[in-house]
Amino acid sequence: MKTIGCLTIFAALFSTAFAQSVSHQSIGDSVIGWMKVYNFKGINPPKKVDEKLYSAAQLSVSDSFANWIQASYLPKGGLGDVKKAVSEKLGLYNQYTAGRPQSYGAYSKTYFELRYNSSHKLEPETNSNIYWGVFANQVPGDWPVRDICTPTQYYFIMPTSETEVDDENIKKILDLSEEVNIKPYITFWVKNMGFGGGAENVLLCKDNRSPFIKITKAEYLQALETAIPVFYEKEKKLIFEAEQGDKQRMILPVKQLDEKIERFTEGLKMNKEKYITRMDETATTRKQPSINDLDNGGDVFSGQNLSDPESSLAGYPVYRIDPAMAELCKKDKPQWILISWQYYPGNPIEQQQHEAIISNFNFEYAYNFFFDPLKVKGQAYKPLHSPYTKETVIVAEASEASKNNLSDNNIFYFEDFSTTAIGKKPIGWRTEYGLDGGIVENPDELDGNWVLITGNTLTPNQLKKPLPQNFTLSFELVAAQNFTWGAKGLTVQLSKETSPGNAESFLKLKLRPGYDGKDGEATLETKFPSPPGYSNGTKWLVANGFSNNKKNNHILVTIKKMDETLQVFIGNTKIADYEKAIPAAHLFNAMSFSSGNSGANDKFYISNIKITKD
């Protein structure tokens, strides 16, 4: 037995030792796909969890949801898996969920921290993932009003983009109400509990009659009144357990608990008096309400003191489930369908999943399947667009400038995006999306094709590696009119990478336009640690003639490496000249262009990227 144990431990250590982490950048634009395509058959025995009995028909619905997810989405930049699930089992810390309606469905996880195992197959390295779920009878988010939840009634709030997102441009992006495939249905975005980001939600319910009902102030106060004795018994039990039933030791904590209950009761009375003429208004609370809001004269609707002026903040409406509909959730047929997926602009994996869902998932079929079945009778689910069909890449004729540059032996690399159709991603480039950048456009009053960079990164896939030892890199850069002063800049980076995305040395040049005709800013950051004595650090420079007052604020940027010398030009003006900056034999093997996004006007365009051998 000891030998077997040692062999087992050795095998585990062997597997771990030969596991190799995969950088995000190396797979960011790659279709990784599913661990397994299940094709569930819809044959399941009934299942009981606590007091909830899930019929074979309900579990068959979960099978359908899992199949629909896999038919509509092909994971990109991560490894996907699909699971089926029902309402969570009750335990010590989730008793407040007992009143949730009977829910069942399927969800996918796209794991984005991956590694190669000893067989050189990709597998999750951690549980970090992007979520997408399709569930019957599910409550959105995880924002319970715990202290008033009962075994038969669940209360919750939903912090939406209206209260949780300050940037109006982001709000517009999160708003799905005008998406053609989704427009007929109820949509909303809900913030994640406890950490950043949130989830888009599409609610499919008969005649768009939401099962989520806003409760009144009178109902909320009644729920609190009911909760006070429940709270008392729970706390008294905890005291009994903590003091091991010793009556003498229990005297003081029980006395303190009694006094707290008296304050709760008095606080409830004071809230009723304050709102006696407004009991029919919608109950709103702070983000994480508690029965303790009743203590010491607390206003349960504003989270402030009852004596304070009423807050101007709208607060968060409190919801419950229509009891009649909750009872029907026990039947075979779903009462509503909730489709939820993680999404906040800026994460490339969330972005590509988001785009796949809104473009491919057949919301209309899903609605009709449950709420107007005659319309889809005899029809199998088909996504609106199959993610398994490769888009035909249309290659346009190269421009004369491109042909001439590519035929010149002194030109190491040239790109003017002339072979890419307008509105498409640039051919031969990897684009990591943030908001809506990475697309080829033909802006007004500019000749040729340009790539929009706004909140995303572009990396050329067809760049020969390494770059020449001595070279001149130039590109044309345009900033949009009224570009926000002080917003995030455009960064061009040249790196020597040990593996994709892992730079051991680099130079970064970041450019930001000025305002009202004033010069812009340039930041040169370098890291050349070996051998010692070369450039390491950050230098601030002036970007001459680069401002935001014209329709197209155009400059030519040039970076020149000659032996150990590094020079930077804006147009014909030299803005940096360092004699001992880069080791003479240093060879770069990666190049990228990136920018953040701060607003609707914060757009950069690049074109005519040229690397010349010197």
Image: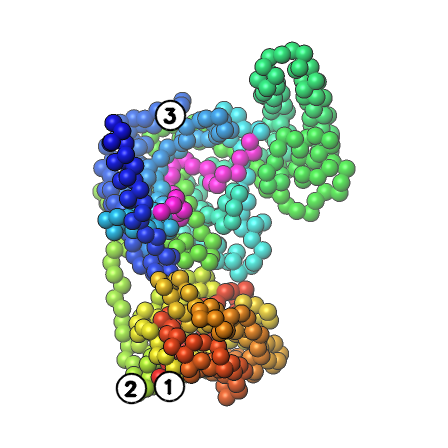
The label number, if any, that marks residue 529 in the structure image: none
Quadrant of res 427: bottom left
The mark that comes first in sequence, 3 or 1, is: 3
Q: Is residue 414 visible?
A: yes
Image coords of residue 456 (percent x, y): 44, 64
Image coords of residue 377 (percent x, y): 25, 42
Q: Are marks 3 and 2 in contact (CB under 8 Å)?
A: no
Q: Label 3 belongs to which residue?
A: 49
- Give, as a three-letter code, the residue at label 1: Asp
Quadrant of res 333: top left
Q: Is residue 215 magenta?
A: no
Stretch of the chain drawn in magenta: 125-146
Q: Nearer the viewer, residue 192 or 568?
A: 568
272 in relation to 577, above or below: above
- Give, as a three-letter code, the residue at label 3: Val
The label number, if any, that marks residue 409 in the structure image: 2
- Give, as a three-letter code, the residue at label 2: Asn
Image coords of residue 268 (percent x, y): 69, 28
Q: Label 1 belongs to which residue?
A: 614
Q: Residue at x 50, y 65 (%)?
A: 596
Image coords of residue 347 (percent x, y): 44, 56
